[in-house]
Amino acid sequence: SLNIENGLSEAHAAPQSLPTPHQRFGYFHQLNPNYQSLVEINPTPGIQCSRLKIPCEAFAGNYVKRIERLALQLEETYRGKSVVCVSHAASVALVAALLNSSIRGFKFAPTGIYQLRRVADGPWELVHSGDTNEHVSENAATTYPWGFEERHFEETEGNDGGHYSGKAQGIGLDYFVTKS
């Protein structure tokens, strides 16, 4: 069965906007409706999703903090096991968190596949980058490899067209480097 890990949700997550695993099971029977997420999403006070007009998590600061918590929980819960995570491009933050690396320079291609390996309690190592998708025969013209940029961590009032909440909270591209 498949587990829906809330901690892996994309940026601007609005927890109350998504169906529960029990609700999804009705049309996707491969899901485990009883799985308890390792990390839950908490809306950031005062931040609303520009499209849905409901409380959401601030991007990029609180998103990066959530991904840091998820990386720690994945390491603890699945130590010595193989795990496959499927998400959106902002999940390059999870790759950086596990590698204790800067987010700078990581890109995630549409359907890109990152492979990391850890031997015993040693450091994680990058086996394959997901910045390309050679396994795809055709891409839509509107899809491209995405990665974090400085502008995602700029403190701004409001937002820039509904894409970024401007709440970096002192977090930047090198957040995971300083955590190592």
Image: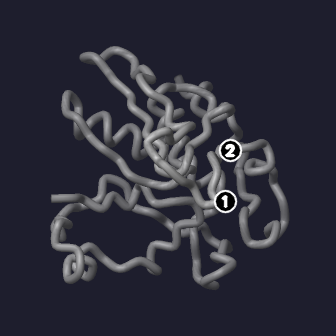
Left or right for 71, reference 97? left
What residue did someone put label 1 on? Answer: 141
- Residue at 79% x, 68% y: name it: 159
Nearer to me, 110 or 156: 110
Q: Amino acid at mark 2?
A: Phe
To which quarter of the image does residue 24 belong? bottom left
Measured as percent of width and height from the top left, residue 54 is found at 58, 82
- Residue at 35% x, 80% y: name it: 19
- Residue at 72% x, 58% y: name it: 167
Q: Secondary structure at mark 1?
A: loop
Q: Amino acid at mark 1?
A: Ala
To which quarter of the image does residue 34 belong? bottom left
Label 1 crowd (10 A; few <14 / some 14-19 / many >=20)? few
Quadrant in which the N terminus appears: bottom left
Q: CA distance from mark 2 to mark 1?
A: 20 Å
To which quarter of the image does residue 55 belong? bottom right
Name the N-terminal-most of marks 2 and 1.
1
Indicate whether 32 appears above or below 84: below
- Residue at 37% x, 55% y: name it: 39
What residue did someone put label 2 on? Answer: 148
Measured as percent of width and height from the top left, residue 22 is found at 22, 78
Closer to viewer: mark 2 or mark 1: 1
